[in-house]
């Protein structure tokens, strides 16, 4: 810890608006350097889009949508360490893929071989590809590894680039889409080459361990809500929950603090706004008497032009287990990932053992899930009939669609009974990493000395991920410390 601020008079004060991963990362980074930090969150929990709900039947905490990191997410791992949660996350070194025909193919790094040769077996074992397809993918990976991630790459369509490389139809459908849609939360046809190159270079091609999954062993509301609040407060952060910020308080070009929903004002030397891109604009309404170009509103306007992409977590309860692996990545299917029940914590206060004996929970993750908006489904119990009022092709309910899709991959699903289902879709789960997004993302210090920006949508070089959110918080904290001639890198080094 750097004690220079602690020993140089009154500590500078910082207000952070938003208690998601970006806000809490900035808070803990700054308080470790002796800064006085107040974290304001409108909800009654921290975590932002990373959270859970209580299942009314079992009483368990269920994550709205499964979040996982990767070993290459070094800033996320640093935050986990600072929150004293290392033992509450599991590293999974093997990925379990299931081909369109249900063939299980576990994929792991080859021993000894350096990156990127360590993943050579992936190329030859990837489900559902012919030899020609595999050669096509090999060419694509070799070219992608050489892409310079700069403006030109971010403004180039990934699908057009792949088609110019003569990628086969199956290579696109079963390899590139499988990875890209899951990693970016957006359709391959929409994303930029720069975003795809970032995912593959950092996540697969540059380090042997980069692809390892980082999976939470507790519900997200517990990790980034209950436990995070305790750790932040113990570190000295003034965490205020249920505290809605209505607007920023301006003094010329400076930010003087915030105005709350009840009309009261809180002042500080610096303010960090760490809210999603679509919630930034309402905080920075322009003063009527301002005649100068307003960088705050210009930034808000650009942020509003970032497109959103939805992600759905489909929560299912069955009468018997049917998945034997710790997760499943489905190739060429509507259902993209499957995760079994997260082990519940002793601190949750719920005893779900009895329910767990009769119900077996699996979460299905569907990214870029715009097509699901046409399917209306309600949670149902075993005794209820399937609601087929809303359908696909005028006949299929979401329950039927999910059951049929999984049954073609997992033999046990055919004889299993789907007891209950609940679909949770966040329409603003991520911003779309399209060819316009790069120029719309502001830097942490884009708005001057007293107002900083954080959030996965800011200019972190990462797409919309937990890693981007955490990194943005560290970058905003670094900018504030720099005002006091403290040059320190709070970011974790890459693998």
Image (cartoon, rainbow, N blue to C red):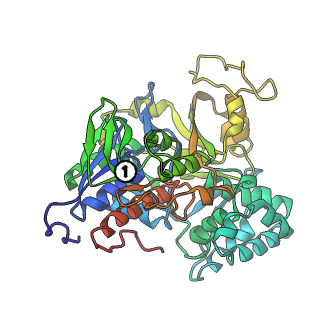
**Res 472 visible:** yes
Seen in the picture, residue 112 relative to 327 is either above or below; the reply is: below
**Res 414 visible:** no
Name the residue beneath numbered marker 1. Answer: 252
Q: Which of 72 and 395 is in front in this view?
A: 72
Seen in the picture, residue 383 relative to 320 is either above or below; the reply is: above
Residue 199 spot, x, y in % from top left: 61, 65
Q: Residue at x 13, y 65 (%)?
A: 9
Q: Residue at x 18, y 70 (%)?
A: 3
Identify the image quadrant of the N terminus: bottom left
Residue 183 spot, x, y in % from top left: 61, 56
Among the 4 quarters of the image, the one containing residue 129? bottom right
Residue 295 spot, x, y in % from top left: 49, 53
Seen in the picture, residue 111 relative to 369 is either above or below; the reply is: below
Among the 4 quarters of the image, the one containing residue 363? top right
Mark 1 surroundings: few (<14), some (14-19) or many (≥20) residues within 10 A: few
Q: Residue at x 75, y 50 (%)?
A: 332
Seen in the picture, residue 178 relative to 377 is either above or below; the reply is: below
Q: Residue at x 51, y 63 (%)?
A: 460
Is 495 positioned to the left or the right of 254 in the image?
Answer: right
Q: Is mark 1 on a helix, strand or loop?
A: loop
How many labels were placed on the picture? 1
Q: Nearer the viewer, residue 238 or 217?
A: 238
């Amino acid at each position: 810890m750097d004690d220079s601020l602690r020993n140089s008079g009154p500590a500078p004060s910082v207000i952070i608006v938003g208690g998601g991963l970006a806000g809490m990362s900035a808070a803990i980074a700054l308080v470790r350097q002796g800064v006085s930090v107040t974290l304001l969150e409108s909800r009654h929990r921290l975590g932002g889009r990373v959270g859970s709900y209580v299942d009314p039947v079992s009483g368990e905490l269920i994550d709205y949508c499964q979040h996982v990191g990767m070993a290459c997410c070094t800033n996320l791992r640093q935050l986990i360490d600072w929150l004293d949660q290392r033992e509450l996350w599991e590293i999974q070194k093997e990925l379990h893929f299931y081909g369109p025909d249900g063939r299980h193919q576990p994929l792991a790094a080859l021993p000894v071989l350096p990156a990127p040769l360590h993943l050579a077996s992936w190329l030859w074992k990837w489900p559902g590809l012919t030899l020609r397809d595999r050669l096509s993918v090999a060419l694509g990976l070799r070219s992608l590894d050489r892409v310079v991630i700069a403006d030109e790459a971010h403004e180039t369509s990934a699908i057009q680039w792949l088609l110019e490389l003569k990628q086969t139809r199956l290579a696109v459908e079963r390899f590139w889409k499988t990875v890209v849609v899951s990693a970016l939360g957006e359709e391959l046809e929409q994303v930029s080459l720069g975003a795809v190159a970032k995912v593959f270079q950092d996540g697969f091609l540059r380090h042997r361990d980069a692809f390892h999954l980082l999976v939470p062993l507790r519900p997200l509301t517990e990790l980034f809500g209950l436990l995070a609040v305790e750790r932040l407060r113990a570190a000295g952060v003034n965490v205020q929950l249920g505290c809605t910020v209505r607007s920023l308080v301006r003094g010329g070009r400076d930010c003087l603090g915030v105005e709350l929903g009840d009309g009261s004002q809180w002042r500080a030397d610096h303010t960090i706004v760490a809210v999603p891109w679509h919630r930034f604009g309402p905080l920075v309404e322009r003063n009527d008497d301002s005649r100068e170009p307003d960088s705050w509103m210009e930034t808000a306007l650009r942020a509003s032009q970032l497109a959103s992409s939805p992600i759905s977590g489909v929560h299912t309860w069955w009468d018997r287990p049917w998945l034997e692996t710790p997760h499943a990545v489905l190739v060429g299917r509507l259902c993209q990932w499957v995760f079994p029940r997260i082990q519940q914590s002793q601190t949750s206060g719920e005893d779900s053992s009895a329910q767990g004996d009769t119900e077996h929970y699996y979460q299905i993750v569907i990214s870029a899930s715009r097509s699901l908006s046409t399917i209306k489904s309600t949670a149902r119990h075993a005794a209820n009939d399937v609601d087929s009022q809303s359908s696909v092709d005028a006949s299929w309910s979401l329950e039927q669609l999910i059951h049929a899709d999984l049954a073609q991959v997992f033999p046990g699903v055919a004889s299993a009974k789907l007891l209950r289902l609940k679909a949770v879709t966040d329409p603003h789960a991520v911003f779309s990493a399209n060819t316009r997004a790069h120029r719309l993302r502001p830097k942490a210090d884009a708005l001057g000395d007293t107002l900083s920006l954080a959030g996965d949508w800011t200019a972190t070089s990462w797409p919309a991920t937990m890693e981007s959110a955490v990194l943005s918080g560290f970058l905003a904290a670094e900018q504030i410390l720099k005002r006091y001639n403290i040059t320190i890198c709070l970011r974790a080094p890459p693998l």
